[in-house]
């Protein structure tokens, strides 16, 4: 029995990116009475497989996990999208098993080993913090023997540590890096090693970002990278240009970059010319992108497979957002994030002519939309496929809700957020009497200056809204509206 187990674990270590050895190990576990561990391995392998299915479900699921702690547990996803429901069910069950049994499933090491194990991936402990020096020498054989490829978590990643990792024969096992502090020296040293080709994901919170980006852009051994996350690094225009022109990085499927306010149009042209044809997720935030940049991205053929595009905190106006929404290239786009762009002035004629595609969420928080912009959005066929519309913090009033109801007519996205606006009780009545609102599962209207208990009552008593899973409205203390709300929504997370 022990030899069979050892052979399966050896196969997993030898082929860390393949699921077949892991699933065979799960079968072995089940056959020998460890049904829960077997289930856990299968759950996590399925979740990892779904990450790369290129679906709108995955794009919205990632937003829910990263940024929406209210909608994710509140909505009945079986009534919205089976793909998201499946992912949430898998992750919830896997998370529960990890909490209850994770400590027993992590490799057993001496107490003084100074190794810290984080969360699991595809059934095995994956995020690992390792010691240095003599402590690393002592624990390295156990790590090699008991862990397949892993993500190394490190603070101040220097060249000396890379030398130690290589001498311990661990560099070839590193599939991901999560680095904080100063890490340019270590990345430069790692990039000189052939083993760096095994690196698939790099997540940086670096203090020495210019040197870090030079290390990345000049080391061809980083050609195996598929995910590059620089959302916590302020990337200037020169470094962005260098990054985009690095041919060995053009196989990335995920590129997330935060600018420092110095980018110009040449940066976007350099990106568009580079040919990142494998991208499915692209995020350029705080990069002072303008409408010209949006037009370039909307026409960039390399983005034909992108499902997740986040351009939040830039300088887009309605013209640039219109180009993105009407793009004939971005037909697989499921998530479009444009939060905190002054995006008013949408082109209603262009939007009315845009054909339906794959759009599932428009994240338009703080876009300064006016009533005419809401009218243009609601009358566009491109938005007829939405599951989630976020119009929070737009300073819109009741006329905008009237245009939303009139424009969408017999269609209503299942999730609608309009908090921090100027809606009043008349807006609540419009929504309460909207026939299409029977499709609503989540509606949030808190922090609207004119919405009172009367508007909340109209929503709570509406037959059109009987399918709501979550409703966020003001509930004055001591008012019977609060009692009515409590009778209607018994789940503590139903309101916001």
Image (cartoon, grey):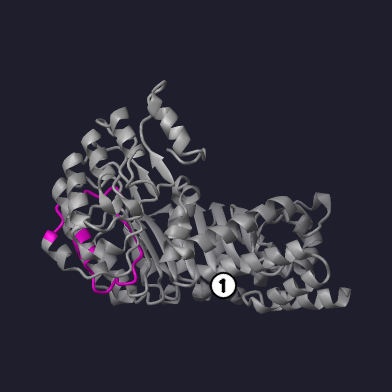
In which image quadrant can residue 409 be found? bottom left
Q: Nearer the viewer, residue 225 or 71?
A: 71
Residue lying at 50% horizontally and 52% vertically, measured from the top left:
205
**Residue projecting furthest to the top:** 478
In percent of width and height, residue 150 lies at: 65, 65
Residue lying at 25% horizontally and 48% vertically, measured from the top left:
434
Residue lying at 33% horizontally and 61% vertically, measured from the top left:
238
Split into 4 quadrants, where in the image is the N terminus? bottom right
**Label 1's element?**
loop
Residue holding disc 1:
192
- 103 above or below 298? above
In which image quadrant can residue 420 be found? top left
Q: Which residues are magenta?
A: 321-348
- 139 above or below 487? below
Image position of 393 (left or right of 12): left
Q: Is residue 322 magenta?
A: yes
In percent of width and height, residue 85 lies at: 50, 60
In percent of width and height, residue 175 lies at: 60, 68
Image position of 39 (left or right of 377): right
Would you say the magenta stretch is mainly helix, strand or loop? loop
**Residue projecting furthest to the left:** 349
- 492 above or below 344? above
Residue lying at 37% horizontally and 60% vertically, measured from the top left:
283
Q: Is residue 481 magenta?
A: no
In which image quadrant can residue 59 be found? bottom left
Q: How many marks?
A: 1
In percent of width and height, residue 197 lies at: 57, 75
Kindly tell me whether residue 110 is visible in this rendering. Answer: yes
């Amino acid at each position: 029995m022990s030899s069979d187990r050892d052979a399966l674990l050896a196969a997993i270590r030898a082929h860390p990116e393949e699921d077949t050895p892991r699933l065979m190990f799960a079968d072995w576990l089940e056959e020998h009475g460890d049904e829960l561990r077997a289930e856990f391995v299968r759950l996590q392998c399925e979740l990892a497989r779904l990450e790369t299915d290129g679906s709108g479900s995955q794009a919205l699921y990632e937003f829910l996990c990263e940024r929406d702690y209210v909608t994710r547990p509140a909505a009945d996803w079986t009534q919205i999208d089976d793909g998201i429901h499946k992912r949430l069910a898998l992750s919830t069950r896997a998370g529960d098993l990890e909490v209850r049994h994770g400590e027993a499933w992590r490799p057993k090491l001496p107490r003084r080993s100074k190794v810290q194990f984080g969360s699991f991936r595809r059934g095995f402990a994956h995020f690992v913090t390792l010691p240095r020096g003599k402590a690393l020498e002592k624990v390295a054989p156990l790590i090699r023997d008991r862990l397949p490829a892993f993500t190394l978590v490190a603070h101040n990643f220097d060249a000396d540590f890379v030398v130690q990792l290589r001498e311990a024969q661990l560099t070839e096992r590193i599939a991901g890096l999560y680095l904080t502090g100063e890490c340019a020296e270590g990345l430069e040293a790692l990039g000189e090693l052939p083993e760096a080709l095994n690196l698939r994901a790099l997540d940086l919170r670096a203090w020495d970002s210019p040197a870090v980006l030079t290390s990345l852009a000049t080391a061809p051994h980083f050609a195996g990278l598929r995910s590059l996350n620089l959302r916590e690094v302020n990337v200037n225009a020169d470094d962005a240009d260098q990054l985009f022109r690095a041919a060995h990085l053009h196989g990335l499927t995920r590129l997330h970059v935060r600018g420092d306010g110095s980018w110009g149009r040449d940066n976007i042209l350099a990106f568009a010319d580079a040919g990142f044809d494998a991208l499915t997720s692209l995020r350029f935030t705080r990069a002072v992108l303008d409408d010209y940049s949006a037009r370039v991205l909307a026409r960039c053929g390399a983005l034909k497979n992108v499902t997740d595009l986040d351009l939040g905190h830039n300088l887009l106006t309605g013209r640039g957002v219109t180009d993105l929404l009407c793009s004939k290239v971005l037909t697989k786009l499921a998530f479009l994030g444009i939060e905190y762009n002054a995006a008013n002035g949408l082109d209603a004629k262009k939007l009315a002519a845009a054909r339906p595609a794959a759009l599932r969420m428009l994240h338009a928080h703080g876009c300064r939309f006016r009533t005419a912009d809401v009218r243009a959005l609601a009358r566009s066929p491109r938005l007829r496929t939405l599951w989630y519309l976020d119009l929070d913090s737009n300073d819109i009033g009741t006329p905008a809700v009237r245009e939303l109801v009139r424009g969408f007519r017999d269609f209503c996205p299942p999730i609608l957020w309009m908090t921090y606006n100027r809606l009043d009780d008349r807006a609540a009545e419009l929504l309460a009497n909207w026939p299409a609102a029977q499709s609503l599962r989540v509606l949030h209207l808190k922090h609207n200056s004119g919405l009172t208990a009367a508007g909340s009552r109209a929503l709570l008593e509406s037959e059109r809204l009987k399918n709501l899973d979550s409703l966020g409205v003001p509930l004055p203390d001591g008012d019977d509206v609060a009692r009515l709300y409590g009778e209607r929504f018994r789940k503590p997370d139903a309101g916001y």
